[in-house]
Image: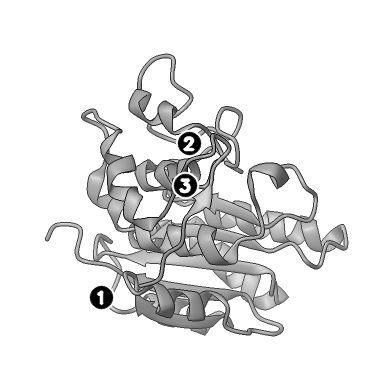
Amino acid sequence: MTSRTVETTAGTAYGYTDLPWLMGLMTGDEKHGPAATSTLDALWVLYDRVLRVSPGTVDAPDRDRFLLSKGHGPMAYYAVLAAKGFFPVELLSGFGSYDSPLGHHPDRLLVPGVEIGSGSLGHGLPLAVGSALGLRAQGRRDARVWVLIGDAELDEGSNHEAIAYAGATGLERLHTLAIDNSSATHGRRGGIASRFEAAGWSVTTVDGRDHDALYAAFTSPHPGQPHAVVARAEPKNG
């Protein structure tokens, strides 16, 4: 694995090895720990090495957009955003409290860097398709759209419609990161990649804890096609 530290807005450097401590600052009964930890490494690699967005460019028209569809386990997302300086680390300890902006589902109006309010399964990928279409219509060819979904979300029909449409229209600026921790009720084990491939997507399946493999998959060329990365993590139920 690779890691680096960055200077946050508060002037303190945080790196990958700090993420467990940052996540530990968030307490309460609604943490959805397995849902959060399954995304931790993939989120870090995206924000550390791939996404063209920073605390200073959260409103830039040509920024990359990251949409967390798997919004019911946002602890890892909050930890990564705090480590990268999008908001003060001190906010993490108030996670889920009445007056905290860090709710059990992210709110785009309250948390800097958050693109969508999420938590209801199946909404993120269709929103990402719409975002990619909108950027293409505006001629913003450099802006990329990334959306993180869970394998259980593929039980929702809205995702299948979005996958089919994106493949047919060649939305090459659209990227889907599917975290596979074997939590789907109806999905066929190991069958996530085939769903995207059948719809005309470029697809790569990797170990969701291997940072170099994740980076290679995230940056793999895919001209004329949307791209999906299936990141396998340990099963949700052990």
Disc nearest the viewer among 2 and 3: 3
Q: CA distance from mark 2 to mark 3?
A: 24 Å
Mark 3, other Cα within 10 Å: few <14 / some 14–19 / many ≥20: some
Residue on which the image places disc 3: 13
The residue at the far top in this view is 99
Is residue 77 shown above or below 212? above
Q: CA distance from mark 1 to mark 3?
A: 40 Å
Is residue 22 shown above or below 148? above
Q: Secondary structure at mark 2?
A: loop
Say left or right for 111 vs 191: right
The residue at the far left in this view is 238
Q: CA distance from mark 1 to mark 2?
A: 29 Å
Of mark 1 and mark 3, the one earlier in the sequence is 3
Is residue 124 shown above or below 193? above
Residue on which the image places disc 2: 106
Disc nearest the viewer among 1 and 2: 2
Q: Amino acid at mark 1?
A: Arg
> Residue 99 at x, y = what percent?
44, 14
Quarter holding residue 117: top right
Task: Kindly indicate whether the residue at mark 3 contacts the one at mark 2 (C-beta within 8 angstroms).
Answer: no
Residue on which the image places disc 1: 189
Q: Which residue sits at x=80%, y=50%?
A: 61
> Residue 151 at x, y = what percent?
35, 63
Q: Amino acid at mark 3?
A: Ala
Q: Which residue sits at x=48%, y=58%?
A: 148
Of the 4 image quadrants, the one containing the N terminus is bottom left
